[in-house]
Image (spheres, helix red, strand yellow):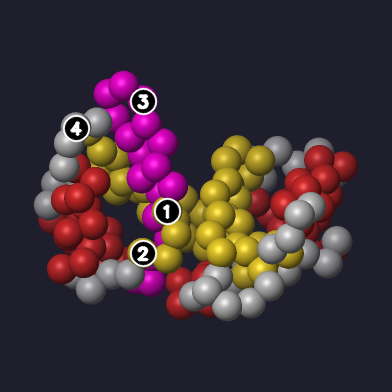
Amino acid sequence: MRAEQISVFLENKAGRLSEVTRILSEAGVNIRALSLADTSDFGILRLIVNDNNKAKEALKKHGFTVGKTDVVAVEVDDRPGGLHRILDILHRSNVNVEYMYAFVQQSGNNAVIIFRFDNLDDAIKVLQDNGVKVIEGNRLYAM
């Protein structure tokens, strides 16, 4: 029930993000979801892609520092209160969310939220026990 996210460390200067997307494009890697956080000196680009190994290999070949993190993807009703329902379940079960980001599927009634938890196994159990649909990694990469 875990999914793999890659994290790319970027210098905070013009063109670095474009360079990453060029490298992934040339390698035939499709970005499914992303989040970019920055500080004054560097940024962390978090990516869900259709081929993690190909992405990591291509980026490392061009000198980027790339890490791997396990995350959890869940389907959330794409309506007012959909996200609150999930966060309330987690809050009531004392599950800590380290960070999250989302994307909306092209068709359907659900959004997809990518979560990083301090304890993934506990979080997955809580979500499943409360009827929340956790998305398998292979399905996520193909969305």
User: Image quarter for residue 57?
Assistant: bottom left
Q: Separation of disc 4 and disc 3 at Cα? A: 11 Å
Please state the horizontal and vertical placement of residue 20, each as a whole percent of the image.
22, 52
**Residue for badge 1:** 34
**Residue for badge 3:** 39
Please state the horizontal and vertical placement of residue 112, each as a whole percent of the image.
60, 63
Which amino acid type is shown beneath numbered disc 2?
A: Ile
Is residue 25 located in the magenta-colored stretch of the structure? no
Residue located at (31% from left, 21% from top): 40
Q: Separation of disc 1 and disc 2 at Cα? A: 7 Å
Which amino acid type is shown beneath numbered disc 4?
A: Lys
Comparing 126 with 102, the one in front is 102
Q: What residue span does the magenta drawing correspond to?
A: 35-51
Instruction: Name the secondary structure under disc 3.
Output: loop
Instruction: Name the secondary structure under disc 1.
Output: strand
**Residue for badge 4:** 13
Please state the horizontal and vertical placement of residue 116, each as a whole percent of the image.
58, 47
Mark 1 touching mark 2, by CB under 8 A? yes
Q: Separation of disc 1 and disc 4 at Cα? A: 19 Å
